[in-house]
Structures are given as structure tokens and as C-alpha cells.
Image (cartoon, rainbow, N blue to C red):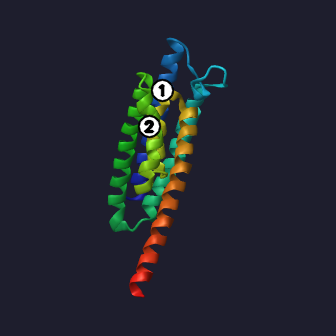
Amino acid sequence: MNEKQLSQIKWYFVGFITLTIWAMLIWQYVHDGVPIHHLLHRADLPGISNWWGGLLLPVLSWVLLGRIQTRILKSPPEKASLLAKQIAISFVITLFYGAMLSISFLNGYAEISSVMFPGILFFAIFFKVYREEFILGFILSMSITFGAVLSTTFGSLAAVSSAIVYFVVQFIWLRIKNITSAKQTS
């Protein structure tokens, strides 16, 4: 993939996200009104209107896709196509994961949703789930249920937490590996 193709994909994707969020906001406004989501699902905590999603999701998509585009362009040309496919697959898997979390929450299966969110940290042991494609998929899939601002907040917390888990586990693994290889050479 070249820079022109990646830029075109980015424009189409951000345009699709912008049209989708604004269509949803207009539909909500015309029908029952644009919902307000309260922090931690408690009415006594501050509420955040879904209107913010009309600005946040397009900007967030643009920024994260720009970072993905840079990562693909900086990769060796022979690996760029494979990397783009891996990113697309990771994005789709995360979309499904976030959708399952949202659906379980909406249907009252708090046990499932309360396990799925920390479950991201388990996946962080093996995969770099702090990457842009994971965060974008997670935020987009949860935005319909929780609103863009809360989804971005939870997605950011998941990204920071998973980065800490991934790098701490990698550090420990390398230490163990170095210690065992030092013992074998002695």
C-alpha cells in the first residue's frame, strides 16, 4: 500500500464515521432526544451528552488512523501489506469484543461485562492491545451504548493499563530468559 491509498482509506473511513455519528445524533434528537450518559452509570454523577460524539469520534478517528498510516508507511515495503491486514483484523476483532461487552451490559448481564473489561488486561499479556487499531475499534463499538466520551475514557484507561501490563510482563520475561541463559552458560 502506498501513501495515497492509505490517505484515501483514512478519508473514507473518517467520512463514514462522521456521517454515521451525525445520522445517529439527528435520529436521537428527532425521536427521544439525545441521551446523556452519567459516569459509572449513576445519576448523581455528572452526565455527558452524546452531542460530544459528533466532534470527538471524527477527530479521534482521524488522529488514530494517521498514526496507523504512519506505522504502515514506516514498515519495510515487503511487510506493509501484511501489517495492514493484521491491523484490519485486529480492528474487526476489537469491534466484536466491544460490541459483545456493550450488548451484555445492555441486556443486564453485568457478570459478563464486568469480566470482559478487565479481560483486556489478560489479552495485554500476549498482544499489544494498547495499539491504535485496538483502541479505535473498542471506542467505536462502545460509543452507541455508552456515548463517545465515556467510551474514549474507558478506552484510554484500557490502553494505558494494557501498555503497563504488556511492558511489565515483557520486562519480567526477558529478565527470566537472561537469568536462565546465564545459568546455562556457567
Query: Which of 153 and 35 lies nearest the eye of the viewer?
Result: 153
Q: From this viewpoint, which residue is outermost toward the top?
A: 31
Q: Residues within 10 Å of mark 1 (few under 14, many from 20)?
A: some
Q: Amino acid at mark 1?
A: Thr
Residue 14 appears in the picture as rendered: no
Residue 24 appears in the picture as rendered: yes
Which image quarter holds the N terminus? bottom left
Secondary structure of residue under mark 2: helix
* Residue 91 position within the rendered picture, expressed as x and y whole percent measured from the top left: 39, 45
Determine the image quadrant of residue 106. Answer: top left
Q: Which residue is mark 2?
A: 115
Q: Amino acid at mark 2?
A: Val
**Residue positioned 40% across, 28% down in the render:** 104
Q: Tag 2 or tag 1, which sits nearer the N-term?
A: 2
**Residue 145 numbered mark, or none:** 1
**Residue positioned 50% across, 17% down in the render:** 28
Q: From this viewpoint, which residue is outermost toward the bottom?
A: 186
